[in-house]
Image: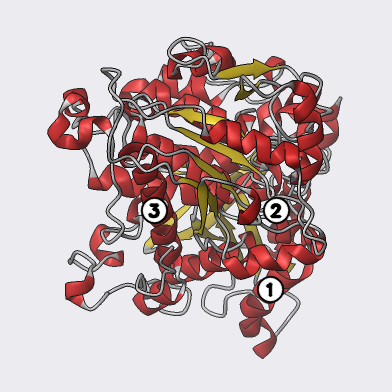
């Protein structure tokens, strides 16, 4: 029934003799519109564009050279194409149909709910890849360490609606204490265990900001919870010897710039008053907020696509986007966490404001560096399920799955200067006007970018390859699989995509051979010369991810290693030194 109503939205299903321009390529072929995809068919092949991946469509005035009527389409996977049609009516019908099919009102109308793989997947366990009980036991909860326990306090998602059902907390903290502690953390996202380190039982816990406010409120229960977390091990080596030279200085990592953290006091929140938290210190990582990151990505895209430079990459524009500076900040924060856990044997609690953006980035990248298991093909899937999907990263909001009609602009009726100024006007409109846009941000994209940097720096230490990262980025936006459709586990329980859509992991596990890294050498992780399985990011060796933008390496990156000796070819110098 729903399918039928979507078919009614198609004003036109096929247009022949269409000119497609993509970079320097020009092809003539046929446009087919289906309920879920725009398909361009030409003698050498075809291009499929699922509607959710479409970012903007402009219908431009007829070309003076050819008389054709162009549609300029920009996609969230950084593909940009122009489709030029012979008849104005056809161009308008395609524009209207694509707009209606892209701007839908409910998640159930997305591609995943009707997608069928052409060849059935041979792997069908995707929805069960991550079992929290099994994963935390693998890390040592209840097996190597009895200082931690599972609690069912959130089993019906009323305790903390955006948290997972299964939470791990210190054994000596009762559910009664947790009930009080929840009132003191934004959205009830209390400090809970993310990672138990195999080497020394040090931990990474995650939470949201404390509700301190102007009155400098405190919570004895929150303090007790953090104290129990930070006392959950006396540092010992694998042989059971007490580790000397280990600092007992546990760390609270506030991922925000200090000014942003203080600014939240006016909203009744803020950051920990360290007088109330004994035996630990606090550091600010200074990762900018989702709006700064969205703006940075927009500037980087413009420079990558050469909007102002006739298709050539605009290197100055790349630098001005500050994208690499943001990636460097994330990796510097990661390096600090990894050192504290592995070298100093201390515990780290990470939070930002709500604990589902910057927190997810820092915690997951740190775990990837600390535990070789997360760098295996299976482990990486579990890491994403655990820290992103189950801990409530807002995929639907951040990726903007339900698009907005403001992204479709009809310039064909404008003439003269009006048309030339529109791209800028359009961007200004997006970035300033609507709530939908304000919630989108490349948070998961930045995580994948950091993984790409580590993969490039340590090519033998990952079982998966760059193609897996590019496909993950694509499918976060394509809405072809159910995995990344919702904002939290409670929403997933309510909508139950497990029974109606495919898991992205079935796709990856079915086609595993495409995503395996030929250079992977698991023996390196047992070699103590190589830090015994732990990676330390090189925050000075960072490059633009050319493959994600379908660009050649030398088009976007200088053929040098960035660093102090080169006078900082990229703006990493002003990263706040936490």
10 Å neighbourhood of mark 3: few (<14), some, or many (≥20)? Answer: many
Residue drawn at (64%, 84%) of the image? 421
10 Å neighbourhood of mark 2: few (<14), some, or many (≥20)? Answer: many
Give how far across and how far down residue 344 sits, in percent.
34, 42
Residue drawn at (43%, 60%) of the image? 329
- Quarter holding the C terminus? bottom left
Q: CA distance from mark 3 to mark 1?
A: 33 Å
Q: Is residue 505 left or right of residue 354?
A: left
The secondary element bearing badge 2 is classed as: helix
Q: Earlier in the sequence, mark 3 or mark 1?
A: 3
Q: Which residue is mark 1?
A: 426
**Front of the two marks 3 and 1:** 3
Front in this rendered view, residue 175 or 490: 175
Q: Which residue is mark 3?
A: 331
Q: Do the residues bearing badges 2 and 1 touch, measured as CB atoms within 8 Å?
A: no
Q: Earlier in the sequence, mark 2 or mark 1?
A: 2
Q: Is residue 145 above or below residue 435?
A: above
Give how far across and how far down residue 529 sits, in percent.
13, 35
Q: Is residue 241 visible?
A: yes
């Amino acid at each position: 029934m729903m399918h039928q109503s979507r078919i009614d939205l198609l004003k036109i299903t096929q247009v022949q003799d269409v000119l497609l321009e993509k970079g320097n390529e020009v092809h003539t072929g046929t446009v087919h519109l289906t309920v879920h995809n725009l398909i361009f068919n030409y003698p050498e092949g075809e291009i499929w564009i699922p509607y959710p991946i479409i970012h903007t469509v402009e219908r431009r005035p007829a070309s003076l050279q050819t008389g054709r009527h162009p549609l300029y389409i920009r996609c969230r996977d950084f593909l940009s194409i122009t489709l030029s049609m012979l008849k104005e009516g056809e161009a308008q019908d395609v524009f209207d149909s694509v707009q209606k099919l892209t701007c839908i009102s409910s998640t159930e109308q997305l591609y995943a709910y009707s997608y069928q793989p052409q060849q059935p997947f041979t792997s069908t366990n995707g929805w069960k890849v991550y079992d929290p009980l099994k994963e935390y036991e693998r890390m040592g909860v209840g097996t190597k360490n009895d200082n931690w326990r599972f609690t069912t306090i959130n089993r019906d998602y009323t305790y903390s609606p955006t948290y997972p059902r299964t939470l791990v907390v210190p054994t000596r903290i009762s559910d009664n204490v947790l009930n009080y502690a929840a009132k003191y953390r934004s959205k009830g996202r209390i400090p809970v265990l993310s990672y138990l380190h195999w080497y020394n039982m040090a931990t990474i816990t995650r939470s949201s900001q404390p509700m301190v406010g102007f009155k400098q409120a405190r919570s004895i229960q929150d303090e007790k919870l953090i104290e129990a977390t930070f006392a959950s091990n006396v540092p010992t080596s694998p042989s059971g010897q007490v580790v000397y030279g280990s600092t007992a200085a546990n760390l609270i990592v506030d991922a925000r710039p200090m000014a942003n953290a203080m600014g939240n006091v006016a909203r009744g929140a803020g950051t920990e008053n360290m007088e109330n938290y004994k035996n630990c210190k606090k550091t600010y990582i200074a990762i900018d907020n989702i709006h700064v990151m969205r703006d940075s990505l927009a500037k980087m895209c413009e420079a990558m696509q050469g909007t102002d430079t006739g298709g050539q990459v605009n290197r100055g524009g790349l630098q001005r986007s500050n994208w690499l500076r943001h990636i460097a900040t994330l990796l510097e924060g990661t390096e600090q966490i990894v050192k504290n856990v592995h070298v100093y044997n201390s515990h780290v609690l990470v939070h930002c404001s709500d604990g589902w953006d910057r927190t997810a980035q820092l915690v997951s990248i740190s775990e990837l560096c600390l535990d070789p298991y997360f760098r295996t093909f299976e482990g990486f899937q579990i890491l994403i399920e655990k820290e992103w999907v189950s801990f409530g990263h807002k995929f639907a909001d951040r990726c903007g799955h339900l698009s907005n009609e403001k992204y479709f602009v009809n310039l064909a009726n404008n003439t003269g200067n009006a048309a030339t100024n529109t791209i800028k006007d359009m961007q200004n409109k997006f970035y300033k006007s609507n709530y939908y846009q304000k919630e989108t941000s490349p948070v998961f994209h930045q995580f994948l970018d950091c993984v790409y940097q580590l993969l490039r720096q340590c090519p033998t230490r990952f079982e998966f390859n760059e193609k897996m990262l590019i496909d993950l980025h694509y499918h976060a936006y394509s809405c072809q699989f159910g995995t990344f459709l919702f904002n939290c586990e409670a929403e997933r329980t309510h909508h139950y995509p497990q029974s109606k859509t495919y898991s992205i992991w079935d796709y990856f596990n079915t086609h595993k051979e495409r995503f395996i890294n030929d250079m992977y050498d698991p023996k390196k992780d047992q070699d103590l010369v190589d830090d015994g399985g732990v990676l330390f990011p090189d925050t000075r060796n960072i490059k633009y991810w050319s493959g994600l933008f379908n660009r050649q390496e030398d088009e976007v990156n200088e053929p040098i290693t960035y660093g102090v000796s080169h006078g900082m070819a990229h703006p990493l110098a002003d990263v706040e030194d936490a």
